[in-house]
Structures are given as structure tokens and as C-alpha cells.
Amino acid sequence: MCQLELPLSDMAFMGEDCWKAGLNPHQLAKIATIEKQRDVFKNELSKKAMNYDILQQNLDKEKRKVRIALYLCLVKSNLKIGKNAELPL
């Protein structure tokens, strides 16, 4: 039996379902349904977090590509300006 007046550390050996003792079957079924939903939501959250991380990595990679392309354009532009400045008018 679960005794609520025991400290939490003393209740550990009784299992985590001890608080369900004395509930009627309808309540237990509802709790089971909610716990299943929780597990599904936890799995979905985990998958979405992984997808987010992958998308963030891909975004960072694309940003690096854009920065490199921009840098190369600026370098080419500066080279053209430098060559044009050396030409006599």
C-alpha cells in the first residue's frame, strides 16, 4: 500500500505507479491513454528537434556558401577596379 506521509525517498521502492492505487478502472484507463499520448508527443518532439538541428546545420552551411560567394564577387570586383585604375585616361 502507498502511504503518502512517507518521504519521497522512502517511497521509491514502491514504484512510480503507487499513486494510482485505489483509482477506479475508468480513471486508470484515462491515465493510461494520457500516458500513451505523452509518449507519442515525446517521440514527436524528439524527431522534430532532430529535424530542427538538421535544418539549422543546412541553413548555416548555405549561409557560409553565400558569404563565400559574396566575398569572391567582391574580390573580383576589386580586381577589376584595380585593373581599370591602372589604365591611362
Image (spheres, rainbow, N blue to C red):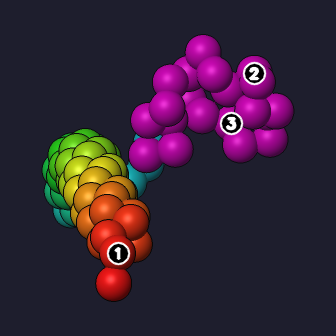
Q: Is residue 86 above or below residue 56?
A: below
Q: Position of residue 11 (x, y in %)?
A: 67, 26
Residue visible at 75% across and 33% down? 8
Indicate the secondary structure of the residue bearing disc 1.
Answer: loop
Q: Nearer the viewer, mark 2 or mark 1?
A: 1
Quarter of the figure with the N terminus:
top right
In this rendered view, identify the residue nearer to me: 41 or 2: 41
Indicate the secondary structure of the residue bearing disc 3.
Answer: loop
Badge 2 vs badge 1, beta-carbon distance below 8 Å: no
Q: Nearer the viewer, mark 3 or mark 2?
A: 2
In this rendered view, identify the residue nearer to me: 5 or 36: 36
Residue 76 picture quarter = bottom left
Q: Amino acid at mark 1?
A: Pro
Q: Nearer the viewer, mark 3 or mark 1?
A: 1
Q: Position of residue 36 (x, y in %)?
A: 19, 49
Q: Which residue is mark 2?
A: 10
> Alpha carbon of mark 3 to alpha carbon of mark 1: how far?
97 Å
Q: Is residue 41 above or below residue 8?
A: below
Q: Which residue is mark 1?
A: 88
Q: Is residue 58 above or below residue 74?
A: above
> Label 1: few (<14), some or many (≥20) within 10 Å?
few
> Alpha carbon of mark 3 to alpha carbon of mark 2: how far?
10 Å
* In-image side of 44 versus 22 (left or right): left
Of the numbered discs in the image, which one, if any, rests on residue 3? 3
Residue visible at 82% across and 33% down? 7
> Alpha carbon of mark 2 to alpha carbon of mark 1: how far?
92 Å
Indicate the secondary structure of the residue bearing disc 2.
Answer: helix
Q: Does label 2 or label 1 sit earlier along the sequence?
A: 2
Badge 3 vs badge 2, beta-carbon distance below 8 Å: no
In this rendered view, identify the residue nearer to me: 30 or 21: 30
Badge 3 vs badge 1, beta-carbon distance below 8 Å: no
